[in-house]
Image (cartoon, rainbow, N blue to C red):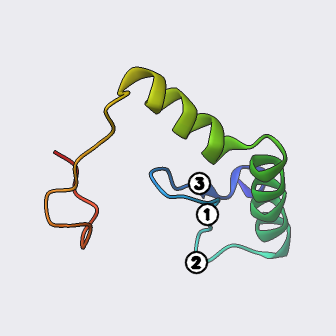
């Protein structure tokens, strides 16, 4: 399981990898490598561009952006 540690959190304007709290050194290194690859591959920018092509009008935040809940 160490080689699969880390999950990319989507819906953010940057790269965030969530690692398991009980991860060992190897697992944590894998999560860091995932973050590096996401930055190199411009994952947040590519997701934003794709969403913009699907929803050109953008999203409206329900509460003015406090919780990030989309309508």
Secondary structure beneath label 1: loop
Q: Which residue is mark 1?
A: 16
Q: Is residue 48 above or below residue 21?
A: above
Rounded to the nearest angstrom, the CA distance separating label 2 from label 3 is 12 Å
Which is more toward the observer, 38 or 21?
38
On residue 45, the disc is none
**Residue that mark 2 sits on:** 21
Q: Image quadrant of residue 33?
A: bottom right
Q: Secondary structure at mark 2?
A: loop
Q: Nearer the viewer, mark 1 or mark 2?
A: 1
Q: Which residue is mark 3?
A: 7
- Circle 1 or circle 3, nearest the eye: 1
| 64 relative to 34, above or below | below
Q: Earlier in the sequence, mark 1 or mark 3?
A: 3
Residue 25 found in image quarter: bottom right
Q: Residues within 10 Å of mark 1 (few under 14, many from 20)?
A: many
- Check the image and report above or below for 10 versus 18: above
Whether pointer 2 and pointer 3 mark residues with C-beta atoms closer than 8 Å, the reply is no
Q: Earlier in the sequence, mark 2 or mark 3?
A: 3
Q: Position of residue 20 (x, y in %)?
A: 59, 69
Residue 46 pos. (x, y %): 63, 35
Horizontal and vertical percent position of residue 21 = 58, 78
What's the residue at 31%, 32% (across, down)?
57
């Amino acid at each position: 399981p160490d080689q699969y540690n880390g999950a990319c959190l989507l819906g953010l304007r940057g790269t965030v990898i969530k690692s398991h709290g009980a991860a060992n050194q190897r697992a944590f290194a894998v999560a860091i490598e995932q973050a590096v690859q996401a930055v190199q591959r411009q994952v947040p920018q590519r997701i934003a561009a794709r969403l913009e092509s699907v929803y050109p009008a953008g999203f409206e935040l329900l509460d003015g952006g406090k919780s990030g809940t989309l309508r």
